[in-house]
Image (cartoon, rainbow, N blue to C red):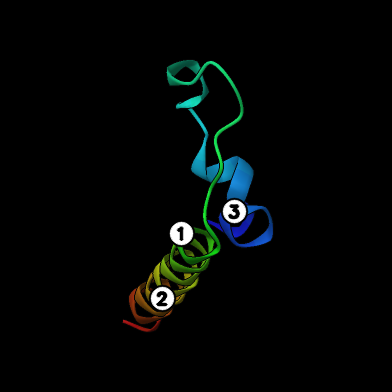
Amino acid sequence: MVWSIVNPEESYLLGKRWMFKEEPDISEADIFMFRLSSIVSLIIVVLLFVAWIIR
């Protein structure tokens, strides 16, 4: 998840490069949404982990 925040272009294409003959163009909106979803997922995982530890 952290790698998706730092380098969303590479993370977005992880395991999908074989589908394209040349480097695909990823829009800025796609990069923003992918980064945002990674940040939200990371926050949720951290909160769940902290709740599990406290319990």
Q: Left or right of 6: which side holds 13? A: left
> What residue does disc 2 label?
53
In percent of the image, x 55 and y 63: which residue is there?
28
In percent of the image, x 48 and y 21: which residue is there?
20
In percent of the image, x 52 and y 56: which residue is there?
27
Q: Quadrant of residue 47?
A: bottom left
As rendered, which of 45 and 18 lies closer to the eye? 18
Q: Quadrant of residue 24?
A: top right
Foreground mark, 3 or 2, reads 3
Q: Alpha-carbon distance for marks 2 and 1?
A: 34 Å
Q: Which mark is residue 30?
A: 1
As rendered, which of 31 and 42 lies closer to the eye? 31
Q: Position of residue 43 (x, y in %)?
A: 45, 77
> What residue does disc 3 label?
8
As rendered, which of 46 and 53 lies closer to the eye? 46
Q: Position of residue 22 (x, y in %)?
A: 59, 21
Q: Residues within 10 Å of mark 1 (few under 14, many from 20)?
A: few
SS class, disc 2:
helix
Amino acid tagged 1: Asp
Amino acid tagged 3: Pro
Whichever of labels 3 and 1 marks the residue nearer the N terminus, that label is 3
Amino acid tagged 2: Ile
